[in-house]
Each structure stands twice: as C-alpha cells, then as structure tokens.
Image (tube, helix red, strand yellow):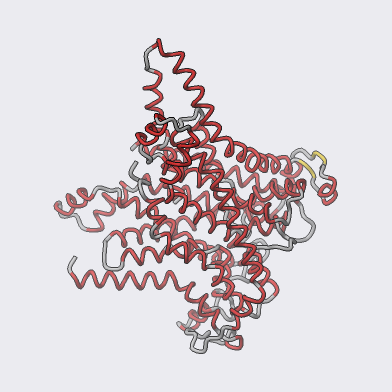
C-alpha cells in the first residue's frame, strides 16, 4: 500500500510541471499581473501547507535532531532531571563499536532482513501468480490473506510465541506427531532467530502478495496470449514474460520490505526480547534494550545505535526512491 | 480452464488460506480452552468444551486499556486528518513551489525507524512534561500516519476535475471555500481510508506506548497484553482472549476495506 501511494506521489509532479510551463508562456504585457497572481497563489498554497510544515519541523525534524544530539552527549539519570548532559563527542559511537553485541546485532539484522525478504518475496510472488488465475472464491480468499497484515503486531507475536512454546506449543506437538524431536524455538540460541524469522515472514507475505498481484495486473494480457500461441508452457511464460516485466514492481516491493524489516521491533521484543543472550538481537532491539530494556537506561549509546540503523535505512531508502522513479519512467 | 480444474484450484486456494490463517484459528481456539487443558499434550485441536473465562477476565481487567486505546486512536485520526487533508489539497491543486521537495521529505519520513522517533520524543516529552500522557501518545502515533495521509489525499485530490475547481473560483469562491465545499466532500472515500488505517496503526502501536507511556495511569491495550504476558504466563486463554478482542478493529477494517480501501488505495494506484 505504501508503495502504491508513494508511486502516486511521485506522479503528482507530472501534470503540475506541465501547467507551470504553460503559465510562464503567457504574453509579456500581462507578465506583471501574472506574477502578482502567482505570488498570491503561492501564499494561499503555503497557507494550506503551513500545518504540515510546522508539524514536520516540530514532530519529525526536532526529535531526529534531539536523537542525534543525544548520541553525542553523556545523558545520565541526573540529566533526565536537570535537562542538560555533558558533551561526549564520539565516545558513544566508540563504545558501541567496541561492544561485542555490535557485530552480533549487525549480523542478525542482515540475516533477519535478508531471509525475511527472500521468503516473503518468493512466497508472495507464488501466491500472486496463483491468485492471478481467477477461480471461484479467489477474491474472497485473497482478502482473507490480508488479515495477518492488519492485525496488531503484538497480537501476532504473542500468538506465535504460544504456538512455538517448547512444552505446550502446537508446533512442537505437530513435530512430535510426525516423529521429529521437539525444538526449543524461543529458548535455544540456535533457534530463536529462526522463530522470529518465521513469524516475520508470515506477517510480510500479504504485503508482498498485494503489491505483486497489482503488478501482475498491469502486464498486458496480449503478451500472454501471444506466448500461448507460440506454444510456450506456463513455466516458460513465467520466466520470459511475467518475471522480467514485473522487475520494477519487484524492486519497489523488495526495497520497501527492506526498509520496513530493518525497523522490526515488536515481534522480536515480544517473542524473545532479543535473547537468549544476544542470539536474536538486531540493531533495533539492541537500541531499545539499551535505552528502555530495564536496568539503568543508557540513552546515549542507545541513540548511537539507532543512528547507525537510520544510516542503513536511508541508504536503502534512496535506492528505493531511485527504483521508483525508474519504474515510473517506464 | 474447465470446470473441474477450476474447482481443483479453488480447493488448493482454500487449503493455502487455511494454512495462512491457522495462527488466527489457534488464537481463538486457545482463548476458549479451559485452563487445565492449556498444558495438555497434545493440545486440544478443537474447542470442544469452550470456556469464556478468558473473556470475562478480559472484560474485568483489560477494559480500561481498551478505552484508552480507543481515545488515542480517535485523537490520532483527528490530528492526522487536520494536518494532512489541507496539505494534500495544496499539493494536488494549488501548485506550491517546493511541492516536490515536500513530497520527497514525506517519502523519506516514512522510512525512519520508530525506535529513533521514540528516543527523540522521549527526551522532548520529558522536557515538555508530556510523558505518560494521552496527548503525547496521540502526537507520537500520528507520525506513523501523517506522511501516508498526505500521499493518499494528494493522489485522490488530483482526481478532482479541474473544471469544477475553476468554476468555483470564477464564482468567487476562495481557496478555503473550494477546499471545504467541493474538494473535501468529493474526497470522502480517501478520508475514510486514511482514518481507518490511521486508527489501526495507532491502535496497534506498541513501541511508542512502551517508551513514552511506561508508568502512566492510562495505558493502551498493547501494553495491557504485554503486561499480561509478563505477569501471567499461566492464563494463556486470557492472553489470547485479549488478543482476539484487540484484533476486532482489524476485522472491522477488513470488512469496510473491501469498499473503501479498494476505492481509495487501488484506484489509479498503478494507472497514472
């Protein structure tokens, strides 16, 4: 949904730019009047934009700046009351880079994000192709597939936590029923990341399904007809028509998914709190644990970790914007 | 496709959907399981002897949390609409200079990880005395929805026929009048879409609630569930009953979404 709206917002610039050109091409005698009218129009436009401008500055830019500032200071319990904190330069960054959790959290973030995307995309695409063949009930079933996406993350996470419970969970009951050993999903360091991964993949499938299904619908049906006349099988048609033509939508889906997966917090925190040990700790979890995880709050290092995370998110965010522009120009 | 093959496809589709929705079934099943059967091995697959103990516990213990979440949700919707509808109007119809820069900023704003906003808000709210308060959470939650709202409104209001807007201005209506009496009523669908999603996001928020409202008197339902899990790992039927109740807005949204979201989000999304 965000991808489609985002795409539309970029398309917004199209027609208005065209009209602007038409406006400036009016006759020179009327130039002064036009200029005055334009200034008036700009004033009106920005009067309507004033709330959002103020909002963005106060509730986006200011917290972001505060966070940045926090990461360069030594914010302690005392400063929580007095409101000021000593300047610490890059100390917090040095501290987190030297922490052994850093490498683990970075690695877990990449594994968690990479595998989530891979499975969400493949399963989402398979389902999109499946639902593209219209059959009785297909619309209803496709709508039902969206439910996991709309649920509060906390609800999904706690349901999965109980399903994956070592002793009383239904998943282990199923494993024993088919003769396998039960798995300590949430309490074993070898499995905790897998457990949160499974949950996150489950939550992400609907999003991939929706976007890829919309992408499939934009492929002209004549191409399929032509390929079936040429005698291409279904497999061949998928690889030589569907998949290549879906590339722009795929790029957007994957990059958006990436930006969203990087910031996943609720699921992991509810299911494992990043543990046991650091085995399922990602950067987002680590940052939260430092700042709010109990014990004495280390807000400044937490802010430093968060800033590392935002750097990664923005790098891929810019890639997303580029992919989106490209998709629009096609 | 002939009939039997279509039927086969439908059956496969039903099986896939059943697998996908199994966790939801399980949540409902556990919420109805009596306490002494919760730890049975294997766990009861069907709620043959359903109990509503879990639900009565929810009503007694979680009701205030649900009320708080409702208030925060409605407040967030109101704030989001007030900020994003005029912005969408300006971006779509008034050709502001710097509009594309603003669009770009809104796009990037959606990508900021919540933990960063939470930390920034935590420090600021501490300064402003807004920690543990409902207005504080409304403001924080609205940051989840405002960029989305502006994008939806812009896209939708672009579809308002320009002739109508021009006719209004020839008749002497100012920009505000045009906005209120023509553009806004015509964008009712997008207003519903934005409100529904905003409410859902605010209702589901856990990160802001757990950082900015750690000890307040009025905490939202997500904190209620989280507390429950922490304090009370025995009564999973009650925990799952809370989860079922907390999912109600999502279910309502899905039913309504058939009409509005399909109209609002999909229409023209890929057709520009």
User: Against A54, is B144 above or below?
Assistant: below
The answer to which quarter of the image holds residue A71 is top right
Image location (x, y in percent) of residue A173: 51, 81
| Position of the C terminus of chain B by quadrant | top left
Q: Residue at position x 83%, y 47% from top? A: A79
Q: Residue at position x 21%, y 48% from top? A: A223
User: Against A15, is A150 above or below?
Assistant: below
User: Against A188, is A320 above or below?
Assistant: above
Q: Using residue B67 as the reference point, say whether residue B128 is left or right of it.
A: right
Q: Using residue A167 as the reference point, say whether residue A208 is left or right of it.
A: left
Image location (x, y in percent) of residue B24: 48, 72
Image location (x, y in percent) of residue A255: 47, 47
Which one is nearer the viewer's eye here, A247 or B200?
Answer: B200
Count of residue discs: 0
Q: Using residue A262 as the reference point, say whether residue B185 is left or right of it.
A: left
Q: Residue at position x 73%, y 51% from top? A: B130
* The residue positioned farthest toward the left in the image shown: A229
Image location (x, y in percent) of residue A92: 74, 45
């Amino acid at each position: 949904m965000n991808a489609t709206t985002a795409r539309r917002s970029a398309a917004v610039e199209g027609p208005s730019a065209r009209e602007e050109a038409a406006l400036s091409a009016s006759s020179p005698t009327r130039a002064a009047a036009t200029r005055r009218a334009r200034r008036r129009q700009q004033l009106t436009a920005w009067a309507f934009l004033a709330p959002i401008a103020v909002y963005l500055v106060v509730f986006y830019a200011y917290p972001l700046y505060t966070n940045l500032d926090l990461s360069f200071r030594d914010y302690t319990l005392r400063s929580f009351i007095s409101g000021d904190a000593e300047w610490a330069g890059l100390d917090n960054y040095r501290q987190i880079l030297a922490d052994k959790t850093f490498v683990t959290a970075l690695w877990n973030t990449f594994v968690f994000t990479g595998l989530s995307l891979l499975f969400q995309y493949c399963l989402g695409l398979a389902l999109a192709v499946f639902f593209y063949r219209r059959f009785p009930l297909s619309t209803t079933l496709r709508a039902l597939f969206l439910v996991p996406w709309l649920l509060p993350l906390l609800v999904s996470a706690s349901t999965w936590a109980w399903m994956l419970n070592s002793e009383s969970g239904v998943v282990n009951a199923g494993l024993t029923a088919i003769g396998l050993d039960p798995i300590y999903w949430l309490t074993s360091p070898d499995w905790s990341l897998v457990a949160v991964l499974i949950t996150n993949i489950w939550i992400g499938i609907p999003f991939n399904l929706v976007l890829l299904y919309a992408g499939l619908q934009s492929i002209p049906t004549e191409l399929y007809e032509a390929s079936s006349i040429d005698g291409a099988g279904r497999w061949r048609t998928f690889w030589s028509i569907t998949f290549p033509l879906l590339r722009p939508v795929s790029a957007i889906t994957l990059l958006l998914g990436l930006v969203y997966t990087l910031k996943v917090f609720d699921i992991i925190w509810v299911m494992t709190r990043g543990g046991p040990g650091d085995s399922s700790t990602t950067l987002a979890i680590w940052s939260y644990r430092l700042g709010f995880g109990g014990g004495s709050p280390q807000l400044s290092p937490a802010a430093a970790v968060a800033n590392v995370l935002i750097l990664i998110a923005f790098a891929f965010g810019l890639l997303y914007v580029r992919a989106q522009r490209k998709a629009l120009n096609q | 496709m002939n009939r039997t093959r279509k039927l086969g496809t439908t059956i496969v589709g039903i099986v896939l959907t059943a697998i996908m929705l199994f966790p939801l079934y399980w949540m409902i099943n556990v919420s109805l399981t009596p306490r002494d059967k919760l730890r049975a091995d294997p766990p009861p697959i069907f709620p043959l002897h359903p109990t509503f103990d879990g639900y009565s516990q929810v009503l007694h213990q979680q009701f205030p949390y649900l009320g708080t979440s409702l208030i925060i949700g409605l407040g967030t919707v109101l704030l989001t609409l007030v900020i994003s509808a005029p912005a969408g109007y300006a971006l779509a119809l008034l050709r502001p200079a710097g509009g594309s820069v603003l669009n770009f900023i809104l796009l990037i704003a959606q990508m900021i990880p919540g933990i960063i906003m939470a930390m920034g808000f935590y420090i600021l709210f501490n300064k402003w005395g807004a920690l543990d308060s409902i207005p504080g959470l409304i403001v924080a939650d609205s940051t989840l929805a405002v960029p989305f709202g502006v994008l939806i409104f812009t896209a939708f209001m672009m579809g308002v026929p320009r002739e109508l807007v021009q006719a209004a201005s020839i008749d002497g209506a100012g920009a505000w009048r045009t906005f209120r009496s023509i553009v806004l009523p015509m964008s009712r669908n997008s207003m519903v879409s934005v409100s529904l999603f905003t409410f859902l996001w605010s209702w589901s928020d856990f990160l802001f609630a757990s950082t900015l409202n750690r000890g307040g008197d009025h905490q939202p339902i997500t904190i209620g569930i989280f507390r429950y899990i922490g304090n009370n790992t025995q009564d999973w039927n009650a925990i799952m009953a809370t989860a079922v109740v907390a999912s109600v807005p999502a279910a309502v949204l899905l039913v309504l979404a058939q009409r509005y979201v399909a109209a609002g989000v999909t229409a023209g999304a890929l057709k520009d």
